[in-house]
Image (cartoon, grey):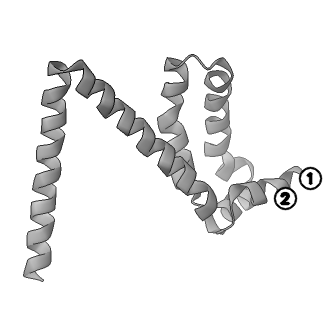
Amino acid sequence: MESFEMFTRVDCFLEMEFSNFKEESKPRSRLFAFRNDYIDMILLLLQFLRAEPLGDWLLHLSVTAAITPHFFAFDRPTYSKWLPFYLADMNNLPQSHPIAHQEFIDSSKSFSELLWKYIL
């Protein structure tokens, strides 16, 4: 048990140190800032791709909310326009369609499979 607690403390310390390093290095190097932002975007993309086959509805919504500002930054008008509406509708799903929402939460199927059930 002690080794786990020690590992947890070391892990938290390293995570804080790495975060501090990134924040201190961004203003000093534009290339570092660019690469760090690029890595963050790739990690968001990987989380988004992971949410679909796992059927993790909450991960899907949180990652979709996190990537929405990037569509504005990269001048993608269609996504920029419709993603906020999509997120508002999906976050309102528990009140508007509780059965569908519960199925999204409980199911391990991909969202594509579940959406076709409600579309057709």
Q: Give the camera-side residue of 78 and 32.
A: 32
Q: How many marks?
A: 2
Q: Which structural element holds mark 2?
A: helix
Q: Which residue is mark 1?
A: 120
**Is the C-beta separation of discs 1 and 2 under 8 Å?**
yes
50 versus 103 height, above or below: above
40 versus 106 height, above or below: above
Kindly identify the residue that appears in the image at 74 percent across and 61 percent down.
Answer: 99
State which quadrant residue 27 falls in: top left
- 33 on left or right of 103: left
Q: Position of residue 96 (x, y in %)?
A: 73, 47
Kindly identify the residue that appears in the image at 65 percent across and 44 percent down.
Answer: 90
**Residue farthest to the front, as pictured:** 31
Instruction: Bin the neighbour count of mark 2 within 10 Å (Cα to Cα): few under 14, some 14-19, many 20 and up.
Output: few
Q: Give the camera-side residue of 5 and 11.
A: 11
116 versus 3 height, above or below: above
- 94 on left or right of 75: right
Q: Which residue is mark 2?
A: 117
Q: Amino acid at mark 2?
A: Lys
